[in-house]
Image: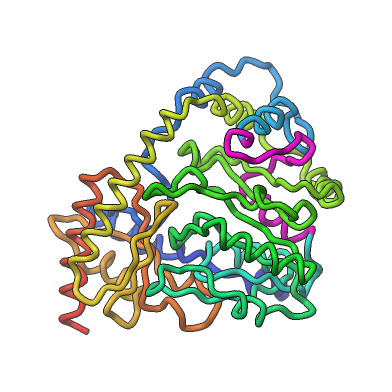
Amino acid sequence: MNLSERAAGIQASPIRKLKPYDDAARLKGIKVYHLNIGQPDIETPDEMLQVYSNYQDKILAYGPAQGLDEYRTNLVKYYQKHGIMLDRESIIITTAGSEAIIFAMLVTCNPGDEIIIPEPFYTNYNGFATIAGIKIVPLTTKAEEGFKLPDDEAIEALITPRTKAIMICNPGNPTGAVYPREDLLRLSEIVQQNNLYVISDEVYREFVYDGLTHTSIMEIPGLEKNAIMVDSISKRYSACGARIGCFITQNKEIIAATLKFAQARLCPPTIDQLAANAAIDIEEEYFDKILKEYDKRRNLVFRELQKVEGIICKKPQGAFYIIAKLPIADAEKFIIWMLSEFSVDNETVMFAPAEGFYATPGLGKDEIRLAYVLNEAALLKAMNIFRKGLEEYRKNQ
């Protein structure tokens, strides 16, 4: 018997597919610094952890398909603090941001339809598109330009009768790019003129540097019918294992249709919603402290990358990732070599090959994505190992 076309066609995660090499290195007693995955080492807030410790109900029951009323009500207050005015009925709680993205694709597109996405993009968008039976049309951005959003003509050239939406990640994973309000206003004009949806993944909203401010797609006037926002608690509270996200739109027709998808999977995790709800009232000092910590890590990694001749990268302005173009032909082979054949004092480092974050064949082959999610001491060690490894690898090319 044959597998389905979806099963045969779905992409292996470039973030996780090299794990067998990581496992093999650790079996040899080599310590691996993991800069390949966005798993922060920041501690999850006590307010969340206490919910798990103190839960006393005798039954862990189903909740509403759209999420707990108390949590959605408090999310309205959270978003108001960020200049986003919503009512509770504009929010559907999802099983992580991943489900929210899948819902957004399913509710806006038919099989065979197209979504334009700036590349490089979060690699799992590929898998979600395969599940939904839709085609991602890449809008290429460049490392040399800091992955800024291309001009209107480049975007409009990709629009076809099958185009249903433009999707962005702001701040960007894997690029760290932050789209200013002016870019969102440009997108607003394009989607309204072409009767499209705009889907905005805003999971990293708290992590914006250099005095910049994050602008949500929900703040842009005139998009009440067009805009869908995706969010998640995973990065905000360093709670990647608490699979809680949300799907937000002011388009009530979309909400009603998406609720049917939510009902089909019954409900999002109850106890994780309670934990997320407990985190909403965390003081802003918590985020100020984390932002300063990530900023220091960003500066360290960027500084160390600049010491390597031939590397091309711009300093990211958001999230906690950097994409670097290396002076080698194949970054994935280099990463495998680092895990299999190179170490310093029995330590090595792992990155994610950036090719898997592109939809255009051949792009990103010489690039890596680094996640600066480790403490400064560990990052400094990892970057020293990286530089020495790259120098040795280039000698043998």
- On the image, the x and y values in percent for residue 231 come to 61, 46
- On the image, the x and y values in percent for residue 375 come to 28, 43
Q: Identify the residue at image location x=43%, y=58%.
A: 176
Image quadrant for the C terminus? Answer: bottom left
Residue interval drawn in magenta: 79-107
Is residue 311 within the magenta segment?
Answer: no
Camera-side residue: 77 or 25? 77
Q: Identify the residue at image location x=67%, y=16%.
A: 57
Q: Identify the residue at image location x=77%, y=38%.
A: 66
Is residue 90 within the magenta segment?
Answer: yes
Q: How is the image coloured?
A: rainbow
Q: Identify the residue at image location x=36%, y=68%.
A: 368
Camera-side residue: 79 or 128? 79
Camera-side residue: 8 or 243? 243
Camera-side residue: 376 or 344? 376
Q: Is residue 242 visible?
A: yes
The answer to which image quadrant residue 59 occupies is top right
Image quadrant for the N terminus? Answer: bottom right
- On the image, the x and y values in percent for residue 164 come to 76, 69
- On the image, the x and y values in percent for residue 213 come to 48, 47
